[in-house]
Amino acid sequence: MKRFLYGMLPACFAVLVAVAHAGVKPACWLIIYQPEVPKVLRK
């Protein structure tokens, strides 16, 4: 049973990383992407 769980953990973590990456990808196109702040919000 332990052997099965230890074999499945890397696959589960890979799926979690893929889901997290898919959620972040639309928010930033590049690693250092920073959106422009609207003039109304600047002080």
Image (cartoon, grey):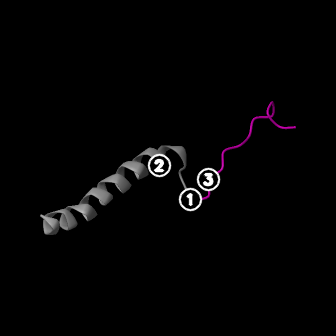
Query: Which corner quadrant of the image does residue 30 belong to?
Result: bottom right
Which residue appears at 31% of the width and 59% of the height? 14
Q: Nearer the viewer, residue 40 or 17?
A: 17
Q: Give the Cα separation between the discs numbered 2 and 1.
A: 10 Å
Query: Which corner quadrant of the image does residue 6 belong to?
Result: bottom left
Q: Amino acid at mark 1?
A: Ile
Name the residue tied to disc 1: 31
- Position above or below: 19 against 9: above
Which residue appears at 87% of the width and 37% of the height? 43
- Position above or below: 8 against 33: below
Q: Amino acid at mark 3?
A: Tyr
Magenta portion: prevailing SS class: loop
Q: Mark 2: which secondary structure?
A: helix
Q: Which residues are magenta?
A: 31-43
Q: Which residue in the rendered view is the most extreme toward the left?
A: 1
Query: Which corner quadrant of the image does residue 23 belong to?
Result: top left
Q: Are marks 2 and 3 in contact (CB under 8 Å)?
A: no
Q: Nearer the viewer, residue 3 or 11?
A: 3
Q: Residue 38 magenta-drawn?
A: yes
Percent of width and height locating residue 16:
34, 53
Q: Are marks 1 and 3 in contact (CB under 8 Å)?
A: yes
Name the residue tied to disc 3: 33
Q: Which residue in the rendered view is the most extreme toward the front?
A: 1
Q: Which mark is residue 25?
A: 2
Q: Are marks 2 and 1 in contact (CB under 8 Å)?
A: no
